[in-house]
């Protein structure tokens, strides 16, 4: 084992000498306390190490041991329902061992090595197998069947396969003999370096929307399954609530939530809420499909840098099993800041605002790990991994380097606006500035599943909202009453779209999640009202008389209608039609 | 064995570089003895081979290269804690601070490293117990809960000290006789401000259950970096080992950040925005995140950091990064202050993120959430009406707009505004909200559920109407 000596300590950066044979990004243990670190620079036998724990009390001369492998995570049954820190130490076990505060030098494996799992083998002895082939299945939680796969990179004949039974993840469940005659013992878990993307067979274009139950997202700015999105916004604009909502309601089979440099209480909120919330489809607790990675802002900064990689590697692993996976990273700005801090300590030449020049490359590499893919393995599975990153720009200014580097790679931009948040319009996603480049990809699916009338209706609604922005300028100058009746109607309908459709209350039990069917029904009510009123106005009705018809309150309460009563909206629509025609007829009789 | 070095090679600003040292560790505490016999303290910022870089808490004035003797003490910066801390006024390094405190040194029960360790997110308990501050603008609108960190964003010349002292005096949890204490850390504030707090605490008897750490404007600036950590270490001891509920007030965080910038500049680090170091966010979070509650422990730490926004600019790095870490913010408005409204709370821009779990049935009252929404909507409509009135004149407003305008005026005058010794109970606050809403027609109460509306604003019966 390579053993070096500490030369220099400056914050989370330690420089050690005698490291001639060490490799870049290898894990090292620093001092007798065995603090975990990673080599990030090698120079003339000296290694610069970012240490994932506090470095107070370290000094020159202390030993540094090289682990001989890059920073890796354990992948196998037991990941779901776990909460990890940035380097996959399970925080519940850490608490058992160290108490309520995280002390140093705790070294716990990511998975439980004692627990027995019931394995149902799905391959026979003597069969040829290669990386990605399914060896067997384990019911990991009530919701998720864990597929135990041959680790990527191996190929050969299975000379031994264990029978059906209960095994710990350390027990050998198969032996694979490769072409060179080497025997590889396979277990239910394997290790994978977090900075290396897991291999796939091929990438495919996302063609289905990730259904989130959030109306502004699903209707106007959908993200494809396997796509990427970002949510930049100033503090208080509701980034975290949106991320939580997606983690709760997105129709992914697995959710990985990375709390990167954010508030401790937010992670507690997730931890306390998810076991109680039910998945809308299965009715089972959401936590059964969730993996949490929590490296809160006060935890060591270097581990924060690693946390997004830990999260995405776990997400890729489930994708390889053929699942639809969604990863939420809150917030990628904190990850970028961790990079900036390490870069500064390495005395690298800074790029924009002190961020390292490779910021853009790192961000692009990270988001590129998302995608809809054909997985390795004979089963020809398709899996997808969607990534949604929150960005916290300084002062809410979108010219921030992290926002700009992110916008260059992601396909969906949900722009959060402080003005909307102040007006208590949530989610504060601006309908004028946001965009989605997946609208064409998912068109076919939507035409089929939601109906051919959905996209034209949605596009008309968006056009009205755009027109409203122009009209408001004029209305402010001359007063809304001076506008033409048609324009007044545009303002009326746009307001209804904003307040009754786009505005959504994340904390209301019936409003927090809206199915596509209900979204469509709601928008139909608004848009058909618009059409009927247009007809009425063309026949000479005064806009004000129509606007004051007594169904306004009912339209406002549409969002609170439970999912099983969508049919009521049909009735509402009939009553609205009746009321409008009534108003127009009374006009004629006069 | 403690070695003594006279091998100082460089002194620049608050930094001192010592050569040919052995066995020195990062973050170790150092003592520097000047030729005059005076002892200064410092902390190791970096060790590189046999060179150690020390940050001097009391500044470098009077130190010299040849004769200064440096000793490394083999431990980090520590605070001696015990229950005797209560009632004491200490300086930025935890020693009795004269002339405010002429008592003997504190005999510690144990020594604790002031950096603390990060709380395991898994061990946290979600804050959900309502704290009554006696301010309607906080209790009714931006409710504070136990374990929350809720900063006050202020500006120069605004009465944040008065507000903070009043919160410290009045804060309590309903219906419980649990022990409560205040830990107050002053960083770079003036003698007058500090004296205001101490005499206010003494006058109201709050001093017996307070610990004050004081680093005044003319005290060494670098000491400020340790001051909030001293205070939080004391708070953690009292909260988690002595089961007390602690309110920590830190003022003024802007001075703390400036001290951090001074060190960073002296070390010639690459500056981030406005010259503040790139790790300002991380550094602030190690202060703010020490608020909270722990599962299975009785005590709690609630933080109210106060900062003055340079030029009242909320996008300045200090308020900006603070807002990203804390659970909301209370913003003081210069406009309201000029109109004589105390506390000048800008309720629209203020926000308490943890409010929702701290209010409602069993915590405050069942109608609280609805009432909050309705008051906010009505005040917002009233402010819009006020803007319109400025452009078009009051006469051009519709009947309804005029009512909203009246509501906004009354709301500011009677709900937000209150006396410096006025301690409103939560039910007084809520009842006042209902009373003000009655300026408006009942049909405008769209955000209030029918059951609450009927209970607190019943439709008068025919007979009553006749009266």
Image: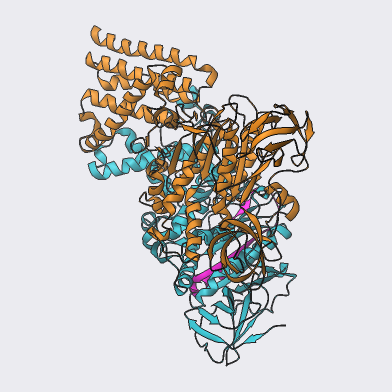
The correct choice, above or below, for A390 with respect to B290 in the image is above
User: Residue A374 appears at what percent x and percent y?
Assistant: 52, 30
Residue at left 38%, top 29%?
A439
Indicate the colour of chain A. Answer: orange
Residue A100 horizontal side relative to residue B341, left or right: right
The correct choice, above or below, for B211 with respect to A483 in the image is below
Write the start and end of the magenta stretch as one range.
B171-200
Residue A546 horizontal side relative to residue B341, left or right: left
Indicate the colour of chain B. Answer: cyan
The verdict on residue B187 being magenta is yes
Nearer to the camera, A35 or A120: A120
User: Residue B273 appears at what percent x and percent y?
Assistant: 40, 61
Q: Which quadrant of the structure image shows residue A536? A: top left
Residue at left 46%, top 18%?
A449
The verdict on residue B110 being magenta is no
The correct choice, above or below, for B444 with respect to B311 in the image is above
Q: Which quadrant of the structure image shows residue A12? A: bottom right
User: Residue A8 appears at what percent x and percent y?
Assistant: 58, 71
Q: Is there any visible trace of residue B368 in the rendered image?
A: yes
């Amino acid at each position: 084992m390579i053993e070096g000596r500490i030369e220099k300590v400056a914050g989370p950066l330690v420089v050690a000498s005698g490291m001639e044979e060490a490799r870049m990004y290898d894990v090292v243990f620093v001092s007798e306390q065995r603090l975990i670190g990673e080599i990030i620079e090698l120079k003339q036998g000296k290694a610069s190490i970012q240490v994932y724990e506090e470095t107070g009390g370290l000094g020159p001369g202390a030993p540094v041991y090289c682990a001989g492998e890059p920073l890796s995570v354990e992948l196998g049954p037991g990941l779901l329902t776990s909460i990890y820190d940035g380097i996959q130490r399970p925080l519940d076990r850490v608490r058992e061992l160290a108490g309520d505060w995280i002390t140093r030098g705790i070294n716990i494996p990511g998975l439980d090595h004692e627990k027995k799992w019931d394995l149902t083998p799905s391959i026979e002895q003597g069969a040829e197998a290669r990386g990605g082939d399914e060896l067997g299945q384990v019911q990991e939680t009530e919701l998720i069947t864990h597929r135990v796969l041959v680790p990527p990179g191996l190929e050969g004949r299975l000379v031994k396969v264990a029978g059906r039974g209960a095994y710990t993840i350390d027990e050998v469940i198969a032996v694979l003999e490769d072409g060179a005659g080497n025997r590889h013992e396979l277990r239910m878990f394997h290790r994978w370096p977090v900075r290396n993307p897991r291999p796939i067979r091929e990438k495919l274009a996302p063609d289905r929307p990730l259904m989130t139950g959030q109306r502004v997202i699903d209707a106007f700015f959908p993200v494809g399954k396997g796509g990427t999105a970002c949510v930049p916004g100033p503090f208080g604009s509701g980034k975290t609530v949106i991320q939580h909502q997606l983690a709760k309601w997105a129709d992914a089979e697995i959710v990985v939530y990375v709390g990167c440099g954010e508030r401790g209480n937010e992670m507690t909120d997730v931890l306390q809420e998810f076991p109680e919330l039910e998945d809308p489809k299965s009715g089972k607790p959401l936590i059964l499909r969730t993996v949490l990675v929590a490296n809160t802002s006060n935890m060591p900064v270097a581990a924060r840098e690693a946390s997004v990689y830990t999260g995405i590697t776990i997400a890729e692993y489930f994708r390889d099993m053929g699942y639809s996976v969604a990863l939420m990273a809150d917030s990628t700005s904190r990850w970028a800041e961790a990079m900036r801090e390490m870069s500064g300590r390495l005395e690298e030449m800074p790029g924009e605002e002190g961020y390292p020049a490779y910021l853009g490359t790192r961000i692009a590499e990270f988001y590129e790990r998302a995608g809809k893919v054909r997985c390795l393995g004979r089963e020809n599975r398709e899996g997808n991994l969607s990534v949604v990153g929150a960005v916290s720009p300084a002062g809410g200014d979108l010219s921030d380097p992290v926002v700009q580097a992110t916008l260059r790679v992601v396909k969906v931009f949900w722009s959060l606006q402080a003005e909307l948040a102040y007006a208590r319009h949530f989610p504060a996603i601006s309908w004028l500035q946001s965009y989605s480049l997946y609208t064409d990809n998912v068109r076919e699916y939507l035409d089929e599943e939601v109906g051919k009338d959905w996209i034209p209706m949605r596009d008309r609604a968006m056009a009205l909202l755009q027109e409203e922005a122009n009209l408001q300028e004029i209305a402010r100058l001359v007063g809304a009453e001076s506008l033409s009746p048609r324009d007044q109607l545009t303002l009326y309908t746009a307001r209804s779209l904003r307040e009754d459709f786009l505005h959504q209350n994340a904390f209301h039990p019936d409003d927090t999640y809206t199915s596509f069917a209900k979204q469509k029904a709601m928008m139909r009510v608004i848009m058909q009202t618009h059409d009927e009123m247009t007809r009425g106005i063309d026949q000479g009705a005064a806009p004000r008389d129509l606007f004051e018809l007594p169904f306004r309150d009912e339209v406002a309460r549409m969002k609170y209608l439970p999912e099983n009563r969508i049919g009521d909206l049909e009735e509402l629509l009939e009553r609205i039609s009746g009321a409008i025609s009534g108003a127009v007829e009374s006009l004629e009789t006069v | 064995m403690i070695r003594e070095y006279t091998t100082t090679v460089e002194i620049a600003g608050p930094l001192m570089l010592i050569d040919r040292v052995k066995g020195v560790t990062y973050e170790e505490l150092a003592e520097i003895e000047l030729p005059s016999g005076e002892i200064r303290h410092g902390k190791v910022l970096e060790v590189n081979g046999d060179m150690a870089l020390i940050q001097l808490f009391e500044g470098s004035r009077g130190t010299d290269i040849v004769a200064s003797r440096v000793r490394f003490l083999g431990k980090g910066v520590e605070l001696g804690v015990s229950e005797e801390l209560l009632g004491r006024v200490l300086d930025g390094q935890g020693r009795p601070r004269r002339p405010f405190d002429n008592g003997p040194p504190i005999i510690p029960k144990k020594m604790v490293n002031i950096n603390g360790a990060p709380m395991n997110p898994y061990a946290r308990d979600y804050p959900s117990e309502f704290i009554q501050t006696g301010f309607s603008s906080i209790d009714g609108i931006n409710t504070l809960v136990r374990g929350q960190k809720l900063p006050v964003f202020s500006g120069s010349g605004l009465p944040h000290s008065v507000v903070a002292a009043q919160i410290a005096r009045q804060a309590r949890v309903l219906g419980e006789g649990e022990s409560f204490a205040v830990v107050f850390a002053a960083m770079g504030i003036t003698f007058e401000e500090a004296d205001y707090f101490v005499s206010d605490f003494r006058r109201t008897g709050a001093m017996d259950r307070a610990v004050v750490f004081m680093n005044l404007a003319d005290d060494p600036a670098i000491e400020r970096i340790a001051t909030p950590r001293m205070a939080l270490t004391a708070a953690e001891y009292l909260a988690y080992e002595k089961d007390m509920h602690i309110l920590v007030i830190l003022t003024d965080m802007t001075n703390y950040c400036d001290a951090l910038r001074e060190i960073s500049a002296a070390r010639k680090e690459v500056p981030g925005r406005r010259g503040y170091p790139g790790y300002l966010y991380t550094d602030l979070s190690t202060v703010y995140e020490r608020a909270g509650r722990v599962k299975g422990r009785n005590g709690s730490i609630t933080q109210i950091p106060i900062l003055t926004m340079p030029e009242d600019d909320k996008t300045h790095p200090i308020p900006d990064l603070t807002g990203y870490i804390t659970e909301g913010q209370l913003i003081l408005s210069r406009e309201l202050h000029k109109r004589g409204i105390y506390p000048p709370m800008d309720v629209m821009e203020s926000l308490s993120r943890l409010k929702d779990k701290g209010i409602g049935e069993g915590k405050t009252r069942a109608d609280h959430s609805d009432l909050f929404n309705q008051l906010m909507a009505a005040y917002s409509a009233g402010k819009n009406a006020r803007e319109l009135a400025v452009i078009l004149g009051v006469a051009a407003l519709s009947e309804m707009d005029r009512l909203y305008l009246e509501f906004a005026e009354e709301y500011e005058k009677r709900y937000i505004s209150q006396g410096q010794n006025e301690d409103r109970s939560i039910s007084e606050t809520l009842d006042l909200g209902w009373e003000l809403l009655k300026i408006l027609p009942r049909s405008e109460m769209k955000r209030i559920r029918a059951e609450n509306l009927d209970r607190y604003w019943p439709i008068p019966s025919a007979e009553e109407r006749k009266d």
